[in-house]
Image: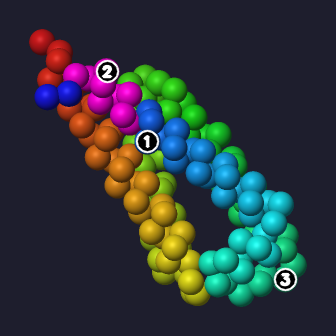
Amino acid sequence: MQTSQDAFRTFRRVMRAGIALNVLLGLWLWWWPAGFLEIIGADLAAPLTWPRYAGLAMLAVGLLYLPAALAPLHNRLVALLSTLFRGLFALFFLFAAGPLWLLAFYEALLAVLQGVTFWRAWRADLMAKP
């Protein structure tokens, strides 16, 4: 069985990977929104202010997830909320009109990975205590 520290290390890696992907997607949406919308097959927004705002929001969300990535044991609430919000974003993209199912899949995959790794880490931490 994994030790608590190993399990939290895995969770931190998953969180950091998700944050990095959010930053990359956010910057892409912010600087080249038309290219991103074309790749996923979405209608071109007019004006491009809203996709750019979505990119900026992805950057902000990535910053808000940082405490959970740095110290998940001490920031349990942030870790749990980041997983919950990823799930909610997945539902939003799933039920939004158009080809946003790719973004729904991205958010759902990260929500499941974060949830499973955090649960394992938290359980290992509880089992290690007398």
Q: Residues within 10 Å of mark 3 (few under 14, many from 20)?
A: few
Q: Which span is picked out in magenta?
A: 3-11
Contact between labelled residues 2 and 1, with CB atoms less than 8 Å apart = no
The kind of residue on which mark 2 rests is Gln
- Front-lying residue, 78 or 112: 112
> Residue drawn 51% across and 27% down?
70
| Marked residue nearer the N-terminal end (3 or 2) | 2
Place residue 74 in its image quadrant. top left
Place residue 52 in its image quadrant. bottom right
Under circle 3, the secondary element is loop
Q: Which residue is mark 2?
A: 5
Disc 3 and disc 1: Cα gap in Å? Answer: 35 Å
Q: Which residue is mark 1?
A: 14
Instruction: Give the x, y percent position of residue 50.
Output: 78, 71
Is residue 101 visible from the viewing direction of this image?
Answer: yes
| Marked residue nearer the N-terminal end (3 or 1) | 1
